[in-house]
Image: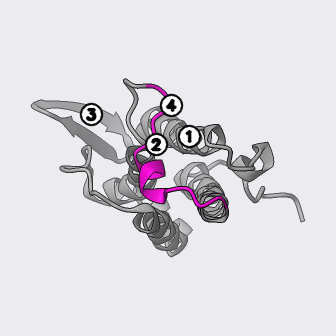
């Protein structure tokens, strides 16, 4: 059985978006139980030259939902601006990305196999096949930003572990 564009994208996005929704919820619970500021958490960075949690969550949504939209439009670009979302807004963003991607059908996604996605950044454009964009650009970025979100929460004492990051696995039967 051949692996399709749908197979390499949608199930993986949904698995990690579901996990991210879970560890963000655990972060909220931890911060509220310990009377810590969620507003401060949104701006937390692991290191000074890294972008904050807010950016990591927005990028996780953008590299999943934005990529599925780019499959249809043929163009992908960084967000034009970084929305100033509070913690609830970040949780909602992940849930919205999850819901929109959940609604995609294999036929709709696979219709874009062999297509092209033009990545536009600044005045530059990079051309990819749809499959290469997903596998060599979108997925690495998606996992990087989801992992960094997890790492920021973990560094702030949120009681999460590897199983929380992996989320619901797709098992036989």
Does the magenta stretch mainly form a helix, a strand or a loop?
Answer: loop
Q: Is residue 27 above or below residue 104?
A: above
Give yes or no for residue 46 being in the magenta stretch. yes
Query: Does the image show residue 155?
Result: yes
Magenta run includes residue 30: no
From the image, tell me which residue sits under label 2. Answer: 134
Q: Earlier in the sequence, mark 2 or mark 3?
A: 3
Q: CA distance from mark 4 to mark 3?
A: 33 Å
Dividing the picture into quarters, in which one does residue 156 lie? top right
Residue behind mark 1: 152
Q: Quadrant of the C terminus?
A: bottom right
Secondary structure at numbered mark 2: helix
Q: CA distance from mark 2 to mark 1?
A: 25 Å
Q: Is residue 164 left or right of residue 133?
A: right
Q: Nearer the viewer, mark 2 or mark 4?
A: 4
Please tell me the numbered disc located at residue 127: 3
The part of the chain drawn in magenta is 34-47
């Amino acid at each position: 059985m051949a692996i399709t564009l749908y197979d390499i994208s949608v199930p993986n996005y949904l698995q990690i978006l579901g996990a991210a929704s879970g560890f963000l919820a655990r972060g909220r619970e931890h911060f509220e139980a310990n009377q810590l500021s969620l507003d401060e958490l949104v701006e937390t960075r692991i290191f000074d030259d890294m972008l904050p949690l807010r950016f990591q969550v927005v990028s996780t949504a953008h590299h999943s939902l934005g990529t599925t939209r780019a499959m249809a439009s043929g163009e992908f670009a960084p967000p034009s601006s970084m929305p100033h979302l509070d913690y609830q807004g970040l949780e909602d963003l992940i849930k919205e990305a999850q819901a929109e991607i959940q609604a995609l059908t294999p036929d709709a996604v696979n219709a874009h196999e062999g297509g092209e996605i033009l990545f536009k950044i600044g005045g530059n454009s990079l051309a990819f096949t749809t499959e290469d964009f997903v596998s060599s650009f979108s997925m690495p970025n998606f996992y990087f930003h989801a992992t960094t979100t997890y790492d920021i929460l973990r560094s702030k004492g949120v009681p999460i572990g590897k199983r929380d990051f992996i989320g619901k696995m797709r098992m036989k039967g």
